[in-house]
Amino acid sequence: MTTKLRAIHGDITSLNVDAIVNAANSSLLGGGGVDGAIHRAAGPELRQECQRLQGCNTGEARITGGYRLPAKHVIHTVGPVWNGGADREAELLASCYRESLRLAVSAGLRSIAFPCISTGIYGFPAEPAARIAVQTVQEFVASAPELEEVVFCCFSDEDLRLYQHALGEQIVRGEGK
């Protein structure tokens, strides 16, 4: 079976997939952007579980329950802060996607949705981040047939265009299911 990869414009907290990925900070205890939105939507139980995990290093990932989210799980990954590209940022960003996918497969999950990791306050340029994300996911799923669907959930129209271009697809409107 071939894994379906697609990009959509929407709110990742509303997606009905096995896991959504949280672009977390190293504490895993919530923050701004997608991280804060996921924590608010999941409820206080998510923060309680994250406290027990005692943080996460850049490029790594951790899995928790999804609590009040439609997704059964949240995979938290800490993307790199952009420092001009000379501090292994591309390698660490690719690791975020690989480690998240590895956890999904280990947990027997079939569908996963990613936000645009590190492109918000962490400053990673959006175009190379989209290329790294799509390439890393394509390489991983080539040997992980158990994954049925990977969604790149974009919050902005511009990010959606970048991911659509990287995937070679036409724009899909709406939040998708």
Image (spheres, rainbow, N blue to C red):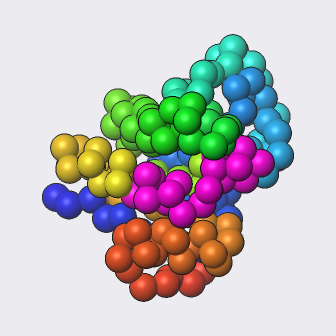
Between 50 and 125, the one nearer to me in the picture: 125
Question: Which residue corresponds to the image point at 40% horizontal and 69% vertical from the top-left?
Answer: 166
Residue drawn where x is 70% and y is 26% of the image: 26
Q: Is residue 143 above or below residue 106?
A: below
152 in relation to 98, above or below:
below
Q: Position of residue 128 (x, y in %)?
A: 50, 57
Which of the 4 image quadrants contains residue 51?
A: top right
Query: Which span is picked out in magenta?
Result: 118-134
Q: Residue at x 45, y 75 (%)?
A: 164
Residue 122 part of the magenta segment: yes
How many labels were placed on the picture?
0
Task: Pick the residue in front: 102 or 167.
Answer: 167
Residue 130 is left or right of residue 51, and the answer is: left
Q: Nearer the viewer, residue 156 or 105?
A: 156
- Residue 15, x across and y down, in percent: 58, 61
Residue 61 placement, left or right of 123: left
